[in-house]
Image: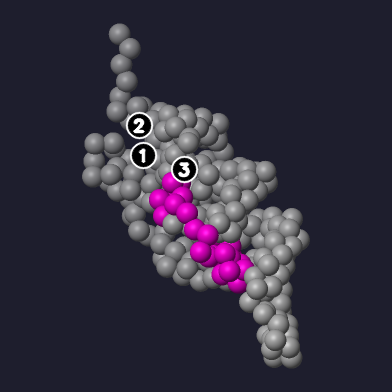
Amino acid sequence: MVSFSEAQVLAWITPWLWPFFRVLGLFTSAPVLSMRVIPRRVRLSLAILIVICAQPSLPEMPPIELNSAGSLMVIAHEVLIGLTMGFAARVVFAAIEFAGELVGLQMGLNFASFFDPMSGSQVTAVSRFHGTTAAWLFVVMNGHLMLTGAVLGSFHAFPVSPEPLGFLNIVQPQVWGAEVFKLGLWVSLPVVSMLILVNLVMGLVARVAPQMNIFSIGFPITLGVGFTGLWLTLPMMQAPLTMALERMMGYFQ
């Protein structure tokens, strides 16, 4: 009769179990990967496949008894790191959508809002367009592979530990809100500058020629300049998106 000791079972399970919770936490909160159109079984299967393929490159896992209180703390630690990494990637997408809000505000299109079933909130047309473009760029530039590599590399910076909140002192997610405004302003600055210049010119025209009804021609001109600016700047969105994702994932390396 074949028998196994508890130490042998732990040695077989722990190299796969703790990384699985961290990868699953990432897939639960990361943009695109956590979309409702992706079934839970697919995310679960992908997490298992990634852990199995990457296990030889991961550092040695500490032997922690599965029926102890420490195992619950380790599970909480791994899930929190995965969720935080997904939240860091979502910060980048929030910044891109914030840039769309700023552009839509200058174009006068903020009244064109609708209910987004993916986010469950009211969004503007330009903001949703920026968010969809960022999602497509995320897939095209292999952003999912970037996140997968980052979560596997995080095991060297933040090894398995029974202290769930210890990594927050290093990552400091409370300061990530500034990244939304900095990146959003950076992405929207070219189009917003063009629209501000157009508004200044129309204001001067209204002062020079008061008999001209500037409001009747101002809105079409603003829309035309705004759409032209979007058409010129969208091909350059990949650079700030890639840089921002790499910077946010750098907190976990």
Magenta residue check for 111:
yes
Q: Count residues near mark 2 (Cα–Cα under 10 Å), then give few for <14, some for 14-19, many for 20+.
A: some
SS at badge 3? loop
- Please report the residue visible at 48 percent of the width from the left and 66 percent of the height from the top: 176
Q: Please give the label number shown on residue 63.
A: 1
Residue 222, given in percent of the width and then of the height, sits at 68, 70
Boundaries of the magenta span: 95-121
- Please report the residue visible at 66 percent of the width from the left and 61 percent of the height from the top: 240
Q: Quadrant of residue 234?
A: bottom right
The residue beneath circle 3 is 34
SS at badge 1? loop
Quarter holding the N terminus is top left
The answer to whether one can see residue 152 in this image is: no
Residue 112, given in percent of the width and then of the height, sits at 53, 60
Residue 113, given in percent of the width and then of the height, sits at 49, 58
Q: Count residues near mark 3 (Cα–Cα under 10 Å), then give few for <14, some for 14-19, many for 20+.
A: some
Q: How is the image coloured?
A: one colour
- Please report the residue visible at 74 percent of the width from the left and 55 percent of the height from the top: 235
What type is the residue that disc 1 sits on?
Pro
Q: Please give the label number shown on residue 100.
A: none
